[in-house]
Image (spheres, helix red, strand yellow):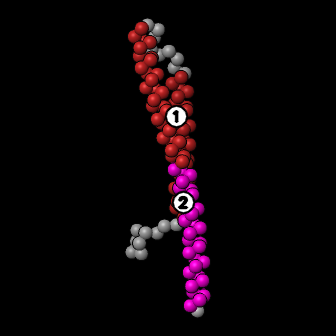
Amino acid sequence: MDSEGILYKPTHTDRAATGVGASAKELQEYLAAFDQELAGDGDAFGADDLGALIATIYGAIHQMAFESYGDNTGELGTYAGDLQAMGVNQKRSEEAAGVEVDNVREKLG
């Protein structure tokens, strides 16, 4: 913010949308890689009853966590699309306002 107020341009929203979208995609890739790494560990809890119990609890927690992370990264992708649309709408509004201001200027001479 400067002495003239907040400077906003539609490109700011476009840049933010690109960043949010890239972050969501990167997070999805990291989660997929981590999930594969965990799957590669095999039966880390042993074959006895206690190991089976731990594996069951771990499986439920793992599923809930990865569903939550997946849902959240999906929402980030949605927000990126919404930001992109906001930038497009802002640009169109500014262009339309510019045309109207030019029309008023022309009429006022």
Question: Is the residue under label 2 in contact with that under label 1 (CB below 8 Å)?
Answer: no
In the image, residue 80 above or below residue 62: below
Q: Which of marks 1 and 2 is in front?
A: 2
Q: Mark 2: which secondary structure?
A: helix
Residue 31, disc = 1
- In this view, the residue farthest toward the top is 48
Q: Position of residue 53 (x, y in %)?
A: 41, 14
Q: For residue 80: magenta?
A: yes
Q: x, y percentage for residue 9?
A: 52, 66
Question: Which residue type does callout 2 highlight?
Answer: Met
The reply to whether residue 15 is in sight is no
- Answer whether residue 105 is magenta in the image: yes
Q: Which amino acid does label 1 sit on?
A: Leu
Q: Which residue is drawn at 56% across and 71% down?
A: 94
**Which residue: 53% across, 26% down?**
37
Report x, y in % for residue 1.
Answer: 40, 68
Chief SS of the magenta region = helix
Q: Where is residue 62 in the image (x, y as percent from the top left)?
A: 46, 26
- How far apart in space, not on screen, are marks 1 and 2 (Cα)? 29 Å
Image quadrant in which you'd find residue 4: bottom left
Quarter of the C terminus within the rendering: bottom right
The answer to whether 3 appears left or right of 19 in the picture is: left
Residues in magenta, as a range: 79-108
Residue identified by numbered label 2: 86
* Residue in view at x 54 percent, y 46 percent: 77
- Secondary element under disc 1, as helix, strand or loop, is helix
Lower position in the chain sequence, tag 1 or tag 2:
1
Residue 16 shows in this picture? yes
Q: Residue at x 44, y 12 (%)?
A: 52
